[in-house]
Image (tube, rainbow, N blue to C red):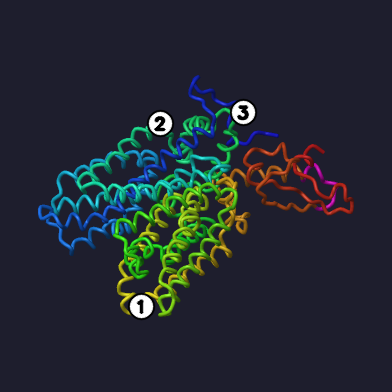
Amino acid sequence: MMIPFFATPTTERKLPRGTMVPGIIREVACAAVVSGTVITVGNTLAWPVMLHSIANETTTGIHEEDIEWLATIPSLISIIFPLFAGVLAEVFGPCRVLTLCLPASAFLWLLLAFLPSKPIIYLVRAALGATAMAINTLIQPLTSELVSADVRGLLASFPETMHAMGVVHLYVMARALPWHTTTALCAVPPCILFLLLLFVPESPYWSMKKGKEHKAHHDLQMLRGPEGRVLEELDSIRRAYTEQPSQSVMDQVIQLTVSSNYKPVLLVYVIFVLKEMGGQPIMFQYTVFLFREAQVKLDPFTCTILVGLVNLVFSVISALIIDSVGRRPLLVGSGVICAASLSVMGAILISPTAPRWLIIVCIMSFVVSYSCGVGTVPWLLVGELLPTAVRSIGCAICMVGHYLTFFIITITYPSMEKDIGMASSLFIYAFFNFLLIFVTLKWVPETRCRTLAELQSAFSSENSELMYRRISLRQSIDLGLEIASEIDLLTKAKKSRSELQIDVLMDHTPSSSSSKIPDYQETYFPFTVRRRSEDSADSQTTLPERNKR
């Protein structure tokens, strides 16, 4: 069979001695380093727990009325900054942008710790929110592009685990240390991870998109090791960009008009919105208030540390079982438990005779189920379902929806609790969990152990014919001339035969008998010629076979 025009050499490029280690070790190491950057995001979002201590110091100029604004600044920044981060990743590469975010974050933490004036605190809080949102936007697609399908579920679950670790890390330090020291120590993880990220390769998908095929091949071979099927994976990446080329941000915006691209983006966007509307911000942001409703006399730090530890432990458990159980079962099962927990909690608040300690059970069951599925799986779907051609801009759109919904739910809950009561609010959040279950069962495909190239075709089956019609005008003219030449030769060779009918059949995989067709025909237009004849043996033959006759 002729080699298509986009094929690579059949031999692997040899890397220098000592650079090859088993592929799985390199993938785990790279995923751990990349995911570790989310610790900074956890620290940023959990830092407001110390605002009451900061407000007690007269030198900072922070008062009680500033606490709400300082706590919500990252959510406000997240409404616009993910799109900017997606543009930067498209131009400079996701791993490079992620690497540059870390020293900036470390500098901001030190500035906040040692120059704590009111303008500095507001400015640094906004800048830290911007770097945190950039990291959150880049992390999941990059992790999914670096690891192979067999371990993607485990390794792509690392970011959510690291996020929970960052939250618990700050809570524990805030409990034991002064706020200046805690803030300064938040600069340590970014410094360490910056040095480690220098050894992590750039996304091979981005390198291929920018025409750096040699670098993409080299990085894939280093990631997968000598036993990896590098050429096959490289070929699938190349085909993805050949079918839907997107060299710039505007190209990605144009590609969003294609059905096979906007459908998965819209689906992931809806999942993130429903995830936040399911009550997660309330359960984690108003933990102390809920514990007080349960008549549990614990100080705020103990409550938040307890919930954070449960979230961390079950995020690790989710990462370990997600490849064996699957994404859909985890998302549906955890959604059912979250909805049931909120409903039961609302019923307890309505009933004056119900034991209040059941609220603690409901809170913990919600945190456990959320950590195992609803809190983990949507982030995994960002890297798996978003098509290669629009992954950067699509991820940014999903992050905008995620944090915008988080912000709205957080600021509207106090007024909802005042107007309709806590029980009614919890019933509304439970309804959105049931809606998430319906959306998952109806439209979310199972992504376990499927390559990104296979997942990309999951939303384009109904447009399979149109998919390969998107070629340039020059290719169309060349193809038309080639077909005309074939028809002319066929007519001259078959003057004495009956009338011929030419059927151009679109298909993804070329027929094995069309080995003499030119490369672009073999890739896009494998076709056959059907002769109106009663002879069944000659009823369907390919053009090259008829030319031979």
Whether 366 is drawn above or below 140: the answer is below
**Mark toward the start of the polypeptide (1 vs 3):** 3
Coordinates of residue 165 in the picture (x, y in percent): 38, 47
Find disc 1 in the rendering and name its residue: 421
Q: Residue furthest left?
A: 59
User: Would residue 98 appear left or right of 18 to someone viewing this image?
Assistant: left
Figure quadrant of residue 53: bottom left
Q: Is residue 469 visible?
A: no
Magenta range: 491-499
The tag on residue 354 is: none
Mark 1 vs mark 3: in front = 1
**Amino acid under disc 3:** Thr
Q: Is residue 99 magenta?
A: no
Question: Which badge, 3 or 2, comes first in the chain's sequence?
Answer: 3
- For residue 283, what is the image quadrant? bottom left
Where is residue 438, by image quadrant? bottom right
The secondary element bearing badge 2 is classed as loop
Identify the element where label 1 is drawn.
loop
Q: Which residue is mark 2?
A: 199
Q: Kindly report the distance in space between the C-alpha atoms of the residues bearing marks 1 and 2.
A: 53 Å
Report the front residue among 309 and 282: 309
Q: CA distance from mark 1 to mark 3?
A: 67 Å
Name the residue at 39% across, 60% down.
402
In percent of width and height, residue 445 lies at: 58, 57
The disc, 1 or 2, on the residue closer to the chain's N-terminal end is 2
Query: Mark 3 near mark 2, Cβ–Cβ under 8 Å?
Result: no
Q: Main secondary structure of the magenta part?
A: loop
Q: Secondary structure at mark 3?
A: loop
| Left or right of 188 in this view: 116 | left
Residue that label 3 marks: 10
Determine crowd level at label 1: few under 14, some 14-19, many 20+ residues with C-alpha closer than 10 A.
some
Q: Amino acid at mark 1?
A: Gly
